[in-house]
Amino acid sequence: MSWFESFILGLVQGLTEFLPISSSAHLRLTAAFAGWEDPGAAFTAITQIGTESAVIIYFRKDIGRIISAWFRSLFDKAMRSDHDAQMGWLVIVGSIPIGVLGVTLKDQIEGPFRDLRLTATTLIVMGIVLGVADRLAARDELGGRHRAARERKSLAELGVRDGLIYGVCQAMALIPGVSRSGATISGGLLMGYTREAAARYSFLLAIPAVVASGGLELKDAAEGGHVSWGPTVFATIIAFVVGYAVIAWFMKFISTKSFMPFVIYRIALGILLIVLVATGVLSPHAGESAG
């Protein structure tokens, strides 16, 4: 991998990780359209450490409170009813599905799941799901001629059942094209949470999964020597800087705006990808590493 490729891929990772459009799909498609080798699941997982570092810094106050309250709740029964302590447990519970499926489906994630036909399908299907979820949220928020506005749930109302459902939604992002934020935000909106609550928990929930995944890939890469370390570290730094700016923008955007621009983009990109593969312009395996 060249330094130019790492710069572009790091930029793509930072721009797309927190938007509901799938960073893994865009890394895959960038390589395919440019005629580069697929950066691979290891590169994706490691560069995601950069974007998750941006999450940790942006939400550092929330994370600090949650970790502190969670540790104190282990020894102080009175603390177990504290919202921040409960949030710590809910992040752990919500991380179970992706942990189990990530290990179980590792070979599929690094192989068959990277087929561009599957990526195109998930872009379209999850785009439709996000659109439906966004429409339901807007209907509750705005009401209508014969319908009063309905208050949506905050994170204070999050329980174990909803935490697990969030976790299952996050696990779907193991397939390129689904989008971690897109799946979890859609799940949150369909369960009746506000846009901000759905996005905030989505970002917090991603931290254990991404850090664990990146750590395992770092270990495997160090032992196998199959990662270009210089360009990969450079891409990770780029992803961190760009990712932080995107989080700040996105959290402001969702407080007043609809997700429909992302829905339209996902569906249009998926259709374009299907056409390019069907007409032979792109191979379903374009950009895949020869190894």
Image (spheres, rainbow, N blue to C red):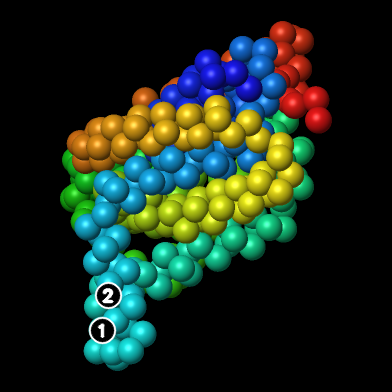
Say left or right for 36 vs 47. Answer: right
Q: Position of residue 210 (x, y in %)?
A: 50, 50
Q: Is residue 141 left or right of residue 131?
A: left
Q: Are the two marked residues, 2 and 1, in contact with CB atoms closer than 8 angstroms? A: yes
Instruction: State the mark number for residue 128.
Output: none
Assess disc 2: are there few (<14), some (14-19) or many (≥20) residues with their C-alpha within 10 Å of its C-alpha.
Answer: many
Q: Residues within 10 Å of mark 1 (few under 14, many from 20)?
A: some
What residue would you read off at disc 2?
69
> Residue 249 vs residue 41: left or right?
left
**Residue drawn at (67%, 26%), measured in percent from left and top?**
38
Rendered residue at 55%/30% (across/down): 230
Amino acid type, residue under disc 1 in the picture: Met
Q: Residue at x 48, y 69 (%)?
A: 93
**8, above or below 127, in the image:** above
* Nearer-the-camera pick, 175 or 78: 78
SS at circle 2: helix
Tag 1 residue: 79
Residue 192, percent across and down?
A: 34, 56
The quadrant of the rendering that contains the C terminus is: top right
Q: Residue at x 76, y 47 (%)?
A: 107
- Viewer can see residue 222: yes
Label 2 and label 1: CA atoms lie apart by: 7 Å
